[in-house]
Amino acid sequence: MNKIIPIAIIVAIVIVIMGVFAYAEANNQTSSSNMNNMSNMSNKNPASCNCNDSENNITIENGTFSPSLLMIPPGTTVVWTVKDPTGKYMVVSNKTTDGMNIFMSDDLSNGQSFNYTFNQTGTFYYYDMNHMNNKTLIGTIVVQ
C-alpha cells in the first residue's frame, strides 16, 4: 500500500507535465495559425483598412476589432476602445524575436481604452489575450 501512493504521485506529475507540454504546443500552433490568418487578413480584407485616417481608433465590439487593419505613418498613436458591456479584453502584440511583446494592455472593460504610439515602421500583429481561440479578435497595424 505504501508503494502505491508514491507511484500514483509520480504518475500524476507525469500527466501534469504532459498536459503542460500539450498546452504549450497547442498555443504555438494557435500562434502560428493566427499569424497565418493575420497575414491573409491583410491581403483579403482591404475594406477594413483605415488607411491614413486622422482618427486612429480601433473599436472592440461584438467580438471584433474594427477596423482590423490599420495603415499609419510613424509617430501615430492608436487607441483601442471597448464598446462591449459583456466582456473583458486584453490587447496584446505578438512577440518579437527576443520573446517580448511590443505592447500589452491591462484587462479592458466597456468604455475603457488603451493606446500605443508606433514610432518604427513595420507590420505589427495583435490579438485579444482573453479570447485567443476567437479567430476574429486579431488585427494588424502597418506603419509606413
Image (cartoon, rainbow, N blue to C red):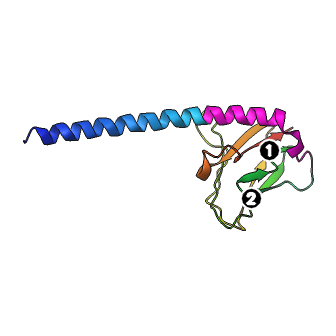
Residue closer to the observer: 87 or 121: 87
The residue nearer to you, when weighing 82 against 120, is: 82
**Three-letter amino acid code at disc 2?**
Glu
The circle on residue 119 is 1
Q: Nearer the viewer, residue 31 or 97?
A: 31
Left or right: 86 as drawn, with respect to 10? right
Q: Quadrant of the C terminus?
A: top right
The answer to whether 74 is drawn above or below residue 109 in the figure is above
Taken as a whole, is the magenta stretch helix, strand or loop? helix
Q: Which mark sits nearer the N-terminus, 2 or 1?
A: 2
Residue 125: tell me if it is visible. Answer: yes
Residue that appears at 61% across and 60% down: 107
| Residues packed near mark 1 inside 10 Å, few (<14), some (14 to 19) or many (20 plus) | few
* Mark seen at residue 61: 2
- Where, by quadrant of the figure, is residue 142 drawn? top right
Regarding residue 97, the answer to whether it shows in the image is no
Proximity of marks 2 and 1: CB atoms separated by less than 8 Å: no
Residue at (21% x, 41% y) in the render: 9
Mark 2, Cα crowd under 10 Å, few <14 / some 14-19 / many 20+, is some
Residue 104: x %, y % from top left: 64, 51
Q: What type is the residue that disc 1 sits on?
A: Asn
Which segment did they paint magenta?
A: 31-52
- Determine if the magenta segment contains residue 123: no
Q: Residue at x 14, y 42 (%)?
A: 5
Q: Nearer the viewer, mark 2 or mark 1?
A: 2
Kind of element beneath mark 1? loop
The residue drawn where x is 60% and y is 46% is 132
Question: Looking at the image, which is closer to me, 62 or 132?
Answer: 62
Q: Position of residue 125 (x, y in %)?
A: 72, 40
Q: How many marks?
A: 2
